[in-house]
Amino acid sequence: MTERVQANDAVQRAKQLQDLQIAWHMRLTHARTSALTLQLVDGLFTKPVITIPEAQRLLGVTYKSAQLTVERLLTEGMLQPVGDGVTYGKAFWASEILDIVTENNDEA
């Protein structure tokens, strides 16, 4: 892949991520979601796989509050659980973000 193609690909992915972040913000704002939920959404664009304790640290809230915020994003379809049947240390991932980051470039 040439440097020009790589640069164009990076710009395209950055735009897709920005568009997704704006769309999620709009969707959550219309649903009258808390500022914590929007803060967690923003954090997912830096770290798209997260646990509840990590959400707790990111948001600076109690475990229960972090859990409720993660559950809200699960309900909205923005997060999905990683693995089946895992309870302790369960992780959640933002598949739409990871799809953009990991998709193959057709010109590669």
Image (cartoon, rainbow, N blue to C red):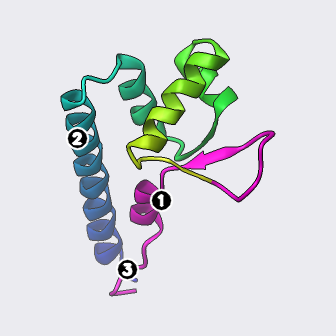
* Between discs 2 and 1, the one toward the N terminus: 2
Q: Foreground: 41 or 11?
A: 41
In this rendering, the answer to whether 10 lies above or below 26 is below
Query: Which quarter of the image is occupied by the N terminus?
Result: bottom left
Residue 98 is tagged as 1
Residue 104, horizontal then vertical, whole percent: 43, 79
Residue at position x 76%, y 54% in the image:
85
Report the number of numbered marks: 3
Is residue 4 covered in magenta?
Answer: no
Q: Is residue 10 left or right of residue 45?
A: left
Residue at position x 30%, y 77% in the image:
5
In this rendering, the answer to whether 14 lies above or below 58 is below
Q: Foreground: 66 or 39?
A: 66
Query: Which quarter of the image is occupied by the C terminus?
Result: bottom left
Q: Which residues are magenta?
A: 82-108
Q: CA distance from mark 2 to mark 3?
A: 23 Å
